[in-house]
Amino acid sequence: MPGGRGSGPEEEPMEAQPTSVLVVGGGLVCLSAAVFLSWRGVPTVLVERHSGSSPHPRAIGFTPRTMALFRAVGLGLHRSFE
Ligand SMILES: Cc1cc2nc3c(=O)[nH]c(=O)nc-3n(C[C@H](O)[C@H](O)[C@H](O)COP(=O)(O)OP(=O)(O)OC[C@H]3O[C@@H](n4cnc5c(N)ncnc54)[C@H](O)[C@@H]3O)c2cc1C
């Protein structure tokens, strides 16, 4: 689906991959969990049923605490947003 979330039925099947943790879903909670687990050295695979991001914004702000946690693992805003 151009410019939107694809459902991905036409995509190639994924290769089998051994992992300690399988995170199902690529929303904010799952993406954050996967980032923090990986940062701690826990092998993590994340699967998401959509092939792209949502065409509609679903969050416009992060709390300072969230940003502090993201910064601790190397994630931050581009300078132009600060
Ligand atoms: C229109 C809208 C505006 C919003 N605006 C704000 C805002 O301004 N600020 C704010 O803080 N919050 C906002 N929210 C709320 C915020 O988006 C949610 O709190 C947040 O997305 C929840 O994250 P989540 O990871 O729990 O779930 P989701 O973001 O819903 O992620 C779940 C993911 O799991 C995937 N999934 C589910 N089942 C499967 C499966 N079986 N296999 C593979 N993948 C699967 C889904 O496709 C989805 O991508 C908004 C929500 C909406 C709908």
Image (cartoon, rainbow, N blue to C red):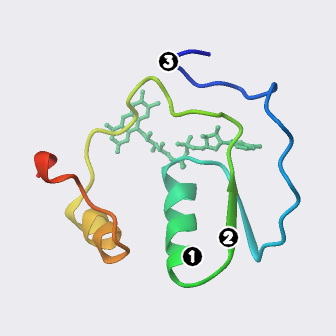
Q: Give the residue at x 68% y 44%.
A: 48
Q: Give the residue at x 49% y 62%.
A: 32
Residue 59 at x, y percent in the picture = 35, 39
Residue 29 at x, y percent in the picture = 52, 56
Q: Which residue is mark 1?
A: 37
The furthest residue to the top: 2
Which residue type carries mark 2? Thr
Q: Is 61 drawn above or below residue 76 in the view shown?
A: above
Q: Is 57 drawn above or below residue 20 in the view shown?
A: above
Which residue type carries mark 1? Leu
Task: Give the spatial CA distance, label 1 vs label 3.
Answer: 31 Å
What kind of element bears circle 1? Answer: helix
What kind of element bears circle 2? Answer: strand
Q: Is 45 drawn above or below residue 58 in the view shown?
A: below
Q: Give the residue at x 68% y 77%.
A: 43
Label located before the other in sequence (3 or 2): 3
Q: Is 50 drawn above or below residue 48 in the view shown?
A: above
Label located before the other in sequence (1 or 2): 1
Label located before the other in sequence (1 or 3): 3
Q: Quadrant of the N terminus?
A: top right
Q: Which residue is mark 2?
A: 44
Residue 14 at x, y percent in the picture = 83, 48
Which residue type carries mark 3? Gly
- Please name whichever residue, 38 or 56, is drawn nearer the observer in this view of the structure: 38
- In the rendered structure, the answer to whether residue 20 lies left or right of residue 53 reads right
- In the rendered structure, the answer to whether residue 67 lies left or right of residue 5 reads left
Locate residue 56: give its quadrant: top left
Q: Are marks 1 and 2 in contact (CB under 8 Å)?
A: yes
Q: Give the residue at x 84% y 71%.
A: 18
Circle 1 packing at 10 Å, graded few (<14), some (14-19), many (20+), is some
Task: Give the spatial CA distance, label 1 vs label 2.
Answer: 7 Å
